[in-house]
Amino acid sequence: MVTSTQFLASLAVLSSAVSASIYAPYNVRNQGVPAGQLKNVSGIEMYISYPPNANTSTRALLYVSDIFGVPLLQNKLLADSLAANDYLVVMPDLFAGDAISVEEQEAGLNLTDWRALHPSSEIDRIINTTLAALKADFGVEKVGGLGYCFGGKYVPRFLKNGGLDLGFIAHPSNLQEAEIGGIENPISIAAGTLDNSFNATAKFRAEEILKINNVTFQSNLYYGAPHGFAVRVNQSVPLQAYAKQASFVQAVTWFDAWL
Ligand SMILES: *[C@@H]1O[C@H](CO)[C@@H](O)[C@H](O)[C@H]1NC(C)=O
Ligand SMILES: *[C@@H]1O[C@H](CO)[C@@H](O)[C@H](O)[C@H]1NC(C)=O
Ligand SMILES: *[C@@H]1O[C@H](CO)[C@@H](O)[C@H](O)[C@H]1NC(C)=O
Ligand SMILES: *[C@@H]1O[C@H](CO)[C@@H](O)[C@H](O)[C@H]1NC(C)=O
Ligand SMILES: *[C@@H]1O[C@H](CO)[C@@H](O)[C@H](O)[C@H]1NC(C)=O
Ligand SMILES: *[C@@H]1O[C@H](CO)[C@@H](O)[C@H](O)[C@H]1NC(C)=O
Ligand SMILES: *[C@@H]1O[C@H](CO)[C@@H](O)[C@H](O)[C@H]1NC(C)=O
């Protein structure tokens, strides 16, 4: 029988291992200098992280970001950490240089007008263009999609024939049941108990819909994990450090097994 004190103590050990920032597969890197490159592909600025051993992989990951986008260090380091597991990872700038900064969000910026400037039709177009470029310019045959927060709405929209072969979403924002109902290809979901954007009820509904539609899925609920936990956490809070690291492993094992 593990007491809750023992459990928290072991989490603290894990969290210090995580913040040791070992750049290795299955460890998400939380600090340091990004290893990827910025490139303008098909008119879209993209952050591209290459697999360490070869540039000939026919499997790639398309990273659909949160509102903080390419400028956010944690997004780039997360893309690099995925690439370290032998994937070409591409994160398109969804907002044409107009990503929100963490400071602006924390100051309570009203996002209504910003959202109107970046409608679904435009985000869909950017994802479509990125997918086409991966296949035409990079020789990729299979593409997995990762969607975090804002991006968690879009990966499901492309999980069908001719789109993404496999998906992973964490704490999606504004994800509609109709979008979940349209999913055809397998999906892995990471949710947090402290996330009001995609709470335990929404997660349960998503699972029901996927089951009814006979879609292969896998899901985890992380206790004490707030919105954004797969990207931005307070590393001093063991439950948050754990949720970020564990959801990273969730994504990598999912793509390793099925992409
Ligand atoms: C990317 O290239 C297109 C032309 O192909 C150009 O219109 C656009 O401004 C470029 N974007 C950036 C961020 O350099
Ligand atoms: C892969 O391509 C990138 C960009 O051209 C380059 O920086 C990197 O060194 C290449 N990696 C290998 C292992 O060839
Ligand atoms: C945010 O801005 C929109 C449009 O400018 C406005 O209609 C709305 O009332 C604002 N919301 C808040 C909470 O201020
Ligand atoms: C994506 O592009 C394909 C053609 O390559 C088109 O059929 C499809 O409607 C596009 N989807 C979106 C969401 O733009
Ligand atoms: C989740 O949110 C919905 C509506 O936003 C609410 O009805 C439901 O009770 C919430 N579930 C939980 C577990 O908090
Ligand atoms: C569900 O999908 C599997 C393959 O993924 C298929 O073998 C099975 O027949 C399907 N079942 C139903 C009820 O459609
Ligand atoms: C992170 O968590 C620690 C421990 O609870 C707390 O002291 C600190 O203020 C938090 N940092 C931020 C930026 O919230």
Image (cartoon, rainbow, N blue to C red):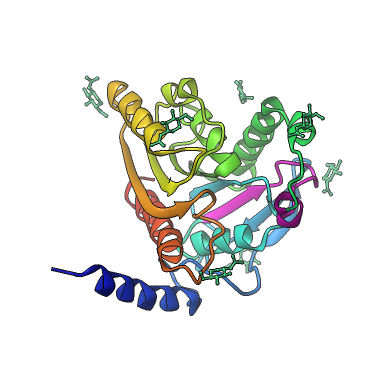
Of residue 9 and residue 20, the one placed in the foreground of this image is 9
| Position of residue 75 measured from the top left corner of the image (x, y, whole percent) | 61, 57
For the point 56% across and 54% down, the residue is 89
107 in the magenta segment: no
Q: Nearer the viewer, residue 65 or 23?
A: 65
Query: Is residue 96 placed above or below 181 in the rendered structure?
Result: below
Please provide percent x and percent y for residue 255: 39, 50
Q: Is residue 234 above or below residue 63?
A: below
| Residue 81: % across, % down | 51, 64
Give left or right: position of 113 versus 28: right
The magenta-colored residue range is 88-106
Q: Residue at x 34, y 24 (%)?
A: 209
Between residues 224 and 27, which one lies in front from this camera angle? 224
Q: Please tell me which residue is depicted at 41% across the width and 55% down the height of the picture.
A: 224
Relative to residue 91, is residue 100 drawn left or right? right
Point out residue 20 in the picture as x, y percentages from the top left corner. Answer: 48, 80
Residue reaching furthest to the left: 1
Check if residue 95 falls in the magenta segment.
yes
